[in-house]
Image (spheres, rainbow, N blue to C red):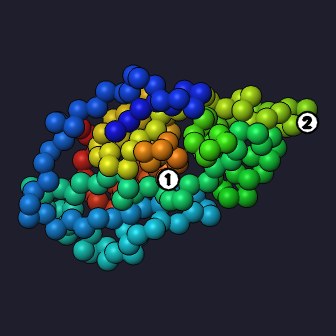
Amino acid sequence: MFFWIHDGRISPNPPTSYPDRVPKIHASSQSAPSEIGDGEPGTSPTGSFLHRNPKDVYKESAGPTEKPVFFLHEMMTSPVYTKGMEENIETCLDFMLEKGIRHLPITGRMGEIVGFVSDRDLLDKSKSYERDMPVSDIMIKRVLVGSPGAEIRQVTKVLLEERIGCLPIVNDDNLPIGIITRSDLLRLLLKYPNLSLIV
């Protein structure tokens, strides 16, 4: 469900997850699939999560024995913004400022994820000659990614243990199809007060 991509190649040592420790979903649960966006300007959720009646949401989350369970494909912001590894730092920074995003996956020739940068990484390169450098020179080349079917409590655990702020989601071909951030997790807790993000 989670694995590292290093220099565009899948690492043989994925982070440890414990799916058997995730509580089972009750058959009578009424929690409907929901979606939530990255919370960054220029992005938009693709489902009905943000359009649900707050009273209904609260009733669903207030039950003493039934708690909603979410998966990455229900919460991720999709499609996800990306830039090619041949783009220079200035172009990537301008793009991030225009879209109002803080995290940017970097892709290779076939669209696969090969790296990752944050707005802070790019802002640190303030000198004019640095702005012309290809983003591949400064990108993080070891990227943790997740599959769409990962359960959100496992996602929270991995983000905390690895001390990272977001998680790109990829399909079977290693192509980015979405992204989730810590802001999304906080927003989910606000919507579902009874939700536990602890595995």
Residue labelled with disc 2: 128
Q: Based on the displayed image, in which of its 4 quarters is residue 79 positioned?
A: bottom right
Q: Quadrant of the C terminus?
A: top left
Does residue 39 appear in this view? no
- Tag 2 secondary structure: helix
Residue 33 drawn at (x, y percent) = 29, 65
Task: Write down the quadrant of residue 27 in the picture.
Answer: bottom left
* Quadrant of the image occupied by residue 22: top left
The percent coordinates of residue 194 (x first, y second) are: 22, 55
Disc 1 residue crowd, few under 14, some 14–19, many 20+, Cα 10 Å? some
For mark 2, does the 10 Å Cα neighbourhood hold few (<14), some (14 to 19), or many (20 or more) residues?
Answer: few
Q: Is residue 86 visible?
A: yes
Instruction: Tell me if 168 is positioned left or right of 72 in this view.
Output: right
The amino acid at mark 1 is Ile
Q: Which residue is mark 1?
A: 177
**Image location of residue 58, percent across then percent down:** 24, 68
Q: Position of residue 123 (x, y in %)?
A: 75, 38
Taking the image as shown, residue 177 lies to the left or right of residue 2, namely right
Q: Give me the residue at 71% from left, 39% from top.
A: 85
Residue 184 versus residue 45: which sits nearer the camera? 45
Asked if residue 133 lies left or right of residue 120, the reply is: right
Q: Nearer the viewer, residue 90 or 14?
A: 14
- In 3D space, how far apart are the residues under numbered discs 2 and 1 (Cα atoms)? 33 Å
- Residue at 32 percent of width and 77 percent of height: 53
Looking at the rendered structure, which numbered label has been put on residue 187? none
Marks 2 and 1 in Cβ contact (< 8 Å): no
Please give the name of the residue rendered at 39% of the width and 22% of the height, measured from the top-left corner: 13
Q: Secondary structure at mark 1?
A: strand
Relative to 71, does residue 2 appear above or below in the rendering? above
